[in-house]
Image (spheres, helix red, strand yellow):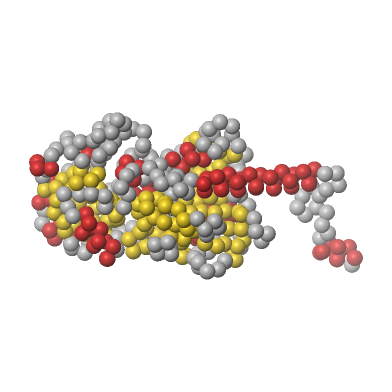
Amino acid sequence: MTSTLQTREPAVLVLEDGRTFSGRAYGHRGETVGEAVFCTAMTGYQETLTDPSYHRQVVIMTAPHVGNTGWNDEDDESSRIWVSGYVVRDPALRPSNWRSQRTLEDELDAQGVVGICDIDTRALTRHLRERGAMRVGIFSGEAAGMPAAHLLERVTSAPLMKGAALAQEVSTDETYVVPAVGEKRFTVAAVDLGIKAMTPQQMAQRGIEVHVVPATATFEEISSIEGLDGVFFSNGPGDPGTADAEVEVLRATLAAGIPFFGICFGNQLLGRALGFGTYKLKYGHRGINQPVMDRTTGKVEVTAHNHGFAVDAPLDRETETEFGSARVSHVCLNDDVVEGLELRSATGELKAFSVQYHPEAAAGPHDAAYLFDRFVDLLTERRGQREDTSEERARPGAPTSATEGTANPKTTEGASA
């Protein structure tokens, strides 16, 4: 259904503050509403479109020319496109890539994604930077001819992102297993809050058998996985302030001493589990060019981001929690937003960590892929501790439980009496 720009019918983009942009139809014809956000990535649009974290969002691409590499069946990060709408300035007239199987616009149309092109995306992005992310509607075909007041009413009646609980809408319905590549070293439960396909692949490449479980999984269901070594919380859409059930699962995980790693939404939930708050950013971080400092190593990484919420934690000190000592491990060099957390025991051992960005970024950059190695190190260390404890208990005369061999003060006092 690809058509040239000259033959496209009119389309209009309407922001909730009343500003409008006139352009031409792109992708599916019709209408859509969502939260307007801009993405600064110049490559990887297929991975962006299929990222479940963009559920209920209309993505504005700041790169002016989009669609050059077409669409293929290998690079999807999930089973479908999740964005509510798509905004580009200049769509490619035809794809030019040996892996392309069809055009980007044909895929948008096939999956019912309404878009708009031929508008000033730079002006739109500047508007959102000044006023913040807001609700937006795209209208093409017959919908574009409706009265302006009617279009604005459709936009302002759409639900807000703040307060939205969306993880269960994008999560898997049933548990599935991604086997380890080569020798199996560990077993990890990955809670699917909107997981991308590259995440379990990154773990599998490091010898981890990944059990991807629904967002509704209980701690009892997770801990019953045979040979469980660790727990992972994925990225995902929505307001972390609504995820009370998921936070309780994470708190139970920490209380049980099970190693934990979280990405993006998982970072925000770890923050909540440790007693920190979360808040909505003015316009969020979305793109593949965000500089983040790892405060442990001092290294600055160029990273991939997609988040509109952040953790409210102190940058200048550690915080004592019921699970150990927590600190901010990573920080964004653009605006000092918390980009990672670490939890350590009283003796300094790492128990859990998380980052706000995407170390699994399929389209790149790959500066932060080492974090999966850090998770493997955590799993290895924890297994070594368990084996040492088992050997200690197996020694002749050693206590067989945590309390055996230790006098109970109340029992001793009663015997003396």
- 100 versus 37 height, above or below: above
Please tell me which residue lies in front, 315 or 388.
315
- 183 versus 323 height, above or below: above
Q: Answer left or right for 29 relative to 316.
A: left
Q: Answer left or right for 46 relative to 198.
A: left
Q: Position of residue 139 (x, y in %)?
A: 17, 50
**At x 50% / y 35%, what residue is drawn?**
178
Count of number-bearing discs: 0
Q: Indicate the quadrant containing the C terminus: top left, top right, bottom left or bottom right.
A: bottom right
Q: Is residue 82 visible?
A: no
What is the residue that sits farthest to the front in this orientation? 299
Q: Is residue 136 visible?
A: yes
**At x 62% / y 39%, what residue is drawn?**
227
Q: Position of residue 90 (x, y in %)?
A: 19, 46
Q: Answer left or right for 117 relative to 414.
A: left
**At x 18% / y 62%, what residue is drawn?**
19
**At x 50% / y 66%, what residue is drawn?**
315
Dividing the picture into quadrants, the one containing residue 80 is: top left
Dividing the picture into quadrants, the one containing residue 242 is: bottom left
Q: Answer left or right for 257 relative to 272.
A: right
Please tell me which residue lies in front, 70 or 167.
70
Q: Position of residue 205 (x, y in %)?
A: 52, 36
Q: Position of residue 62 (x, y in %)?
A: 26, 52
Please tell me which residue lies in front, 34 or 371.
371
Q: Indicate the quadrant containing the N terminus: top left, top right, bottom left or bottom right.
A: top left
